[in-house]
Image: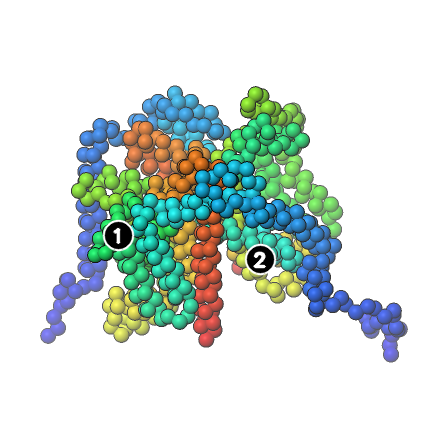
Amino acid sequence: MTGRTPPWRSAGVRATAYQLAVVAVLIGVAAWMTDTARHAMQERGIASGFDFLLDRAGFAIGHAFFAFSPDESYLRAFVVGVGNTLVVAAASLVAASLLGLAVGLARLSGNWLLARIAGLYVELFRNTPMLVQIVFWYTLCTLMPAPRQAWSLFDLAFASNRGLLLPWPERAGVFAVAGCLVVLGAGLVPPLYRWVDRLRRRGRRPRAVGGLALAALLAPAVLWWAAAGFPTAWSVPRLRGFNFAGGLALSPEFLALFLGLSCYIAAFVAEIVRAGILSVGRGQIEAAETIGLARGDLYRKVVFPQAMRVIVPPLAAQYISLVKNSSLGVAIGYPDLFSVTNTVLTLSGNTIEAIAIMALVYLTLALAIGFLADLANRAVRIRER
Amino acid sequence: MATGTAACRSFAIAGTGAIRPPPPARRGTLGWLRANLFATPLDGAVTLALAAAIAWLAPKALAWAVLDAVWWAPDGRACRDAAGACWAVITEKHRLILFGTYPYAEQWRGALVVLLFVAMLAASAGPWLAARAKLWGWAATALAILVLMLGGVPGLEPVGTHLWGGLPLTIVIFIGTVAGGMPLAVLLALARQSELPILRALAVGVIEVVRGLPLLAVLFVASLIFPLFVPVELQIDKLLRAEIGMIIFFGAYAAEIVRGGLQAVAAGQREAAAALGLGYWPRTRLVVLPQALATVVPPLLGDVIRAFKNTTYVAILGLFDVLGATKVALDDPAWSRHAAEAYLFIFLLYLVFCLAFSRWGMAVERRLARRRRG
């Protein structure tokens, strides 16, 4: 006689039971915790909800790229914080990529001295905490001379304990858009080269390809600049009394965070670039040399596409880490999103709501970078034919 | 010879040309210099520029750091007129920087903690201990460190966690993060690979949300929001809350690495174990995990190094780890002008520890590669 398996010994029933138990426990704990929190908030007289966002903030945000007065709302404070985070993250991202690329290539250079110095850079900056580096840069910034004894470069740029002052276009907006258009122009270059390759395969010999590429890169930006009426006026910083006026002022807090983020992430980017280039098989390069590919073509057509497949995923992780670690600005008083959130939750008492907003913004940024990295990954992956 | 016919052209050099010089020597000092520093004109220019920069900077750095430096100045006055570094800030404040606010008379216990940690690190770096021995050794070390720091046993004065500080605190947080984070990582990775959909969804949610947030935000949630959600009787202290945040962050990152290892274990291994009649847990513990973890040791060590560097984040929460204690030391107006020297000192301190870890990681990687080649 074969007895039927009792339900408690069936794998399917057990799996469902385990999962239901986990869910029940989680819901129970969550309900109990929410109840506790509600009581605590009521006792302290804090109204929950997001209405506080429209209240008067009552605190000032100093050294910011965006103006903010204490009479404005908490919501606007968050916007300013996000703006400051984006500015420092974008600037550091570009700097870290360029510096990392340079250091990574230098480490691979045949020049022993250059390779050693690049190796030393990587070891020093990768093996120490970013926060210590940021605090150290900040200390150096504050040790600079006072504005009246500032270091100057041809009386155009000044470095003092108030930060760095640079000449800046009067109509910076025009140049910002032009910069975006250069990125757009960069998008035109690969199709141009593909077209040139097609012509060559048909036996034609197009000339001045480099010049054409440069034109494609710059044309949209130059056209825009011309449309705006060729603005050329520069605002140059001048010493007025005890401080500077005019130009672009970069506060010591911004500089320290910018240097800390860029130098630290650059060390990791350098290693990623190096690993990517080393991952390209020696045979690939030798084969390319054998068929007589020029140096530039060798890098453009053989090394770069294969290295990018190895470089893109870890690079995206480093970019996400850079954006998240810009929150360390709170340690030196740079008014980024984290530091604004910290002030808001202290003043308003709406701790949970403030942290929820901050978390949402950081998650969105991380997801956005992840999405862009996914697109880049798809562009560089192997296409099977 | 058919040199004249167009059908059979020879590319061989005919006749005798001028005798060409031999290729430049690649051996010997001169050969090495030519190959590695002056291979092309551009290479030579780069070498000369770098050498000039070093020749200009090195004497200045040496003068600042050693020749003109002040090593001893009890009240900081001797530092004021010095042209070089003021290392006296370290001589004067090293007890505060290294041990924080731990009771002065009991700081030998902190020193012993650091010694124990370094000794255990050195013991487990080489191939001379079995994995099981290392694990038990670390468990014993962690217990000894806790007892030493907390006290309360005969002969040891009890010391509250709010007084802990400096390097021992950094080490306690670090060991706690790895010891608590590794099991969490394994559980999260197993849940993410599990066949139970709800468990899988939960694991994915926790891992992705935590990885999308800055560590600072996770620490703030653990130390600011968590207390709001639990009644007063169940409140835990500040250090423990920070530790929980560190553990969750480490666990979420390490879980993805462990998952990579789990995916690398061939399905046949799992199926063979199931065919032998092993249930889920014995199968996982005896067959899957040992193979999965062995393949991911190098990237896990990368995360461990990051966990060591990340201990500095607790300074922002107001705990007095090495960085936090250094900040306190520099609040003294007599020494605040010499912050750069103090930060340079702790920079080197972290560098020594992290370099040791990374060299250890490289050695493990080499050993694993050798074993894989068989």
Q: Is residue A243 left or right of residue B261?
A: right
Query: In the image, what residue occupies the spot 22% across and 43% down?
Result: B235
Label 1 Cα neighbours within 10 Å, binned few <14 / some 14-19 / many ≥20: some
Closer to the eye: label 2 or 1 = 1
Q: Does residue A262 appear anywhere in the picture?
A: no
- Quadrant in which residue B147 is drawn: bottom left
Q: Residue at x 25, y 40 (%)?
A: B227
Residue A121 shows in this picture: yes
**Which numbered dot is residue A340?**
none
Q: Nearer the viewer, residue B205 or B235?
A: B235
> Residue A114: where, in percent of width, then height?
63, 54
Q: At 40% across and 46% down in the image, what residue appears?
A: B97
The image quadrant where one finds the C terminus of chain A is: bottom right
Above or below: residue B127 compared with residue A51: below
Do dots 2 and 1 share one subunit? no
Quick check: marks 2 and 1 in contact, CB under 8 Å? Answer: no
Label 2 neighbourhood size at 10 Å, few (<14), some (14-19), many (20+)?
many
Three-letter residue code for mark 2: Ile
Tag shown at residue B150: 1
* Element at label 2: helix
Q: Position of residue A11 (x, y in %)?
A: 21, 63
- Expressed as whole percent of the image width and height from the top left, the position of residue A384 reads 53, 59
Q: Is residue A204 left or right of residue A15?
A: right
> Which residue lies at the image location 24% right of the left edge and 54% below the top edge?
B156
Q: Is residue B278 above or below residue A211?
A: below
* Disc 2 target residue: A277
